[in-house]
Image: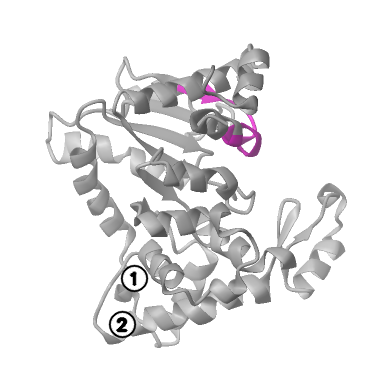
């Protein structure tokens, strides 16, 4: 513990049982995986960017504690929205008490609620729309095609948003990722504000769908990337929440093995899921890790961890451990 900070020391002294102990086991497993030469994929579901996970995730990226990210389109854009519109966000601590009329009032005032946090439409959505549209249009005019996250990287790296920054840039995980050109896969990007906006331009005939690379192309990219990065200790899978952000990339292993008949492809070599989803009839997000063995994703001996708790509490603590805070 000599190289660990106060948060890590507190965790080791007090997090001894149940979900707390599972948190420590998962953190130590992640750390060991990296120390033994392994790489890690992190998957982001829910609204982790709006929860400001960037305060720790950005440093994880800068310190090469993550090799690739899979995230929803919402997490991709909401980190940048927080970067440029933070002071305009509205917190609603009593969100459980809101009436339908209260909710409608928020909408009429151009606020979109995510649990206790409301994202401002004009300062967040429209501010990004103005700049990202030009990048989409310029690419189309030049006959170029890129992935959703690559367009976001172009926007961030161009500097056009700097005048709007309202948080310390070191707390933006997308800025950290853009600076490293970190690989990202964004399954189901259409299900996001920017995805909806892009679709609207296509409906109006201003853009064509092919200007945006597709989810199938994300999978083919991952199918090429995985074998090149899973040698030695292999690639681990750290899943924050459930849903498509995790379901999509974990399938690359059985696809390569079963459909591409690459029988020497290694399984994911570490697995951890942080979720409050419980095992129920047909629930994949709440399924215990062993179920993934039957689908050819994990091996019998893969280190497996599940922390059944709120990811907004658990994940920053695990990252703090890995970063030695």
Q: Which corner quadrant holds the N terminus?
A: top right
Q: Residue at x 51, y 38 (%)?
A: 240
Report the front residue among 203 and 120. Answer: 120
Is residue 164 among what the camera can see? yes
Farthest residue in the front direction? 2
Q: Which residue, given by chain and number where applicable, does mark 2 sit on?
A: 140
- Where residue 67 sits in the image (x, y, percent)? 35, 42
Taking the image as shown, residue 16 lies to the left or right of residue 102, namely left
Q: Which residue, given by chain and number where applicable, does mark 1 sit on?
A: 212
Q: Which residues are magenta?
A: 305-316
Q: Choose the circle earlier in sequence order: 2 or 1.
A: 2
- Where residue 139 sits in the image (x, y, percent)? 31, 80
Q: Secondary structure at mark 1?
A: loop
Q: Which corner quadrant holds the C terminus?
A: top right
Is residue 292 among what the camera can see? no
Write down the quadrant of residue 314 in the picture: top right
Taking the image as shown, residue 143 lies to the left or right of residue 23, namely left
Q: Residue at x 36, y 54 (%)?
A: 180
- Where residue 94 sits in the image (x, y, percent)? 86, 50
Residue 286 - label: none
- Where residue 141 sits in the image (x, y, percent)? 29, 87
Q: Secondary structure at mark 2?
A: helix
Write down the quadrant of residue 22 in the picture: top right
| Label 2, label 1: how far apart the Cα atoms are | 9 Å
Other-residue count near label 1 (Cα within 10 Å), few / some / many at <14 / 14–19 / ≥20: many
Q: Residue at x 59, y 36 (%)?
A: 316
Classify 226 as above or below 34: below
């Amino acid at each position: 513990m000599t190289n660990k900070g106060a948060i890590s020391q507190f965790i080791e002294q007090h997090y001894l049982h149940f979900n707390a102990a599972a948190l420590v086991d998962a953190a130590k497993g992640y750390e060991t995986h990296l120390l033994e030469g392994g790489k890690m994929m992190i998957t982001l579901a829910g609204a982790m960017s709006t929860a400001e996970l960037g305060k720790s995730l950005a440093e994880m990226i800068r310190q090469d504690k993550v090799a690739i990210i899979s995230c929803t389109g919402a997490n991709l854009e909401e980190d940048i929205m927080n970067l440029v519109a933070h002071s305009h966000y509205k917190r609603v601590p009593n969100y459980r008490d809101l009436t339908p009329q209260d909710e409608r009032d928020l909408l009429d005032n151009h606020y979109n609620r995510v649990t206790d946090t409301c994202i401002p439409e004009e300062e967040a959505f429209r501010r990004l729309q103005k700049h990202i549209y030009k990048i989409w249009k310029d690419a189309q005019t030049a006959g170029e095609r890129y992935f959703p996250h690559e367009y976001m990287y172009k926007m961030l790296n161009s500097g056009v948003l700097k005048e709007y920054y309202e948080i310390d840039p070191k707390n933006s995980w997308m800025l950290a990722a853009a600076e490293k050109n970190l690989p990202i896969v964004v399954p189901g990007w259409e299900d996001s504000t920017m995805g909806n906006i892009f679709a609207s331009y296509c409906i109006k005939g201003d853009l064509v769908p092919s200007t945006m690379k597709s989810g199938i192309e994300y999978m083919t990219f991952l199918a090429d990337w995985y074998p090149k990065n899973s040698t030695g200790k292999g690639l681990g899978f750290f899943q924050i929440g459930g849903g498509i952000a995790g379901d999509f990339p974990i399938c690359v292993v059985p696809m390569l093995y079963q459909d591409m008949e690459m029988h020497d492809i290694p399984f994911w070599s570490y697995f951890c899921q942080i979720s409050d989803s419980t095992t129920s009839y047909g629930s994949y997000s709440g399924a215990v890790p062993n179920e993934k063995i039957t689908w050819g994703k994990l091996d019998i001996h893969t280190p497996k961890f599940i922390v059944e708790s709120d990811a907004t509490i658990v994940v920053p603590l695990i990252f703090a451990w890995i970063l030695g805070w």
